[in-house]
Image: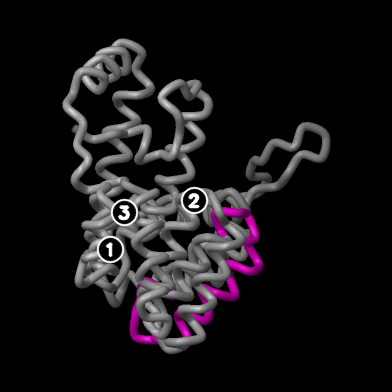
Amino acid sequence: MQNYYKLLNIAPTASEAEIKKAIHVALRLWSNRTNAPQIDRRQEAERMVKLLEEAEAILLNSSKRAEYDKQSKNAPRQEASTDKAVLDAAQDLVAEGRKLLADGNIGDALYVATKATERDGSNPEAWALLGRARFLFGDVDDAIYEYKRAIKLKPNEGGYYSELGDIYNDSEKFDDALIQYKRAAQVEPGVAWYRADVGRLLARQGNLEEAVQILEQCLKEVPDAKSFRNLLGLAYLDSAKNCCSVDPESGNCFPTSKSQMLAILAFIQKAERQ
């Protein structure tokens, strides 16, 4: 039985507000990674998003949560996956750590990732895994440090910069996040997903013209990427809003000329096609 509280790193007595916050933070992190170019990271993210959606549906519904808590209390304990001797003996600690993260066992993943770095301090994947586990455990500063260790060992791996950018982005350090996203795109220019991260953040910062150009090119290269379409559609809608005049008293936006109306319509039509 999936332990949603453990997945979210919260207590079973957590309030609805605490649950919402934990789900929001986790969903924002893992949703960004569902388009990762590395298939293992993509699968891990897709599985996590599915589990988080299940947790949201159950824990934010009072009757479903009560029934879930009752079943959890009566469910047999499963200790095999948390046996430290078993974890220490794992031949591939990084693979084991990824599996634990995908299962929502953040504490065990943190333990395994630490063991992996102790066993082989020159393995960048071990440091990246430790960084992901640290972040999900709430240790943001340590997570940033671990990712920088991974980058130092393998500076041409775009995924490390991208994931470090996600941490900065989630911490609302947007300028730092943009630097990392751009570095990911620079070291692996052929990967559209990294450039889309740049476009996504530029749009969030209001640099819509450049964001639209980047996202249009990404979608052209990967036309089946649904997330690219969604990001581009939102950028078009924000661009339409920017075509309006702002009332200084109320702060409301509205068109004041025919040219504005035509520009707004053009962006809305583009958004509808996404």
Q: For mark 1, does the 10 Å Cα neighbourhood hold few (<14), some (14 to 19), or many (20 or more) residues?
A: some
Q: For mark 3, does the 10 Å Cα neighbourhood hold few (<14), some (14 to 19), or many (20 or more) residues?
A: many
Image quadrant in which the C terminus is located: bottom left
**Horizontal side, residue 175 vs residue 264: left or right:** right
Q: Amino acid at mark 1?
A: Asp
Q: Residue at x 44, y 75 (%)?
A: 160
Query: Which mark lies nearer to you, 2 or 3?
Result: 3
What is the magenta range? 169-195
Q: What's the distance in space between the residues labelled 2 and 1, CA to CA?
A: 51 Å
Q: For mark 2, does the 10 Å Cα neighbourhood hold few (<14), some (14 to 19), or many (20 or more) residues?
A: some
Does 1 appear above or below 186? above
The overriding secondary structure of the stretch rendered in magenta is helix
Q: Residue at x 20, y 18 (%)?
A: 74
* Sequence-first tag of 3 and 1: 1
* Sequence-first tag of 2 and 3: 3
55 inside magenta stretch: no
* Sequence-first tag of 2 and 1: 1
Question: Residue 101, which numbered label?
Answer: 3
Q: What's the distance in space between the residues labelled 3 and 1, CA to CA?
A: 16 Å
Q: Secondary structure at mark 1?
A: helix
Q: Position of residue 141 (x, y in %)?
A: 61, 61
Q: Residue at x 27, y 73 (%)?
A: 38
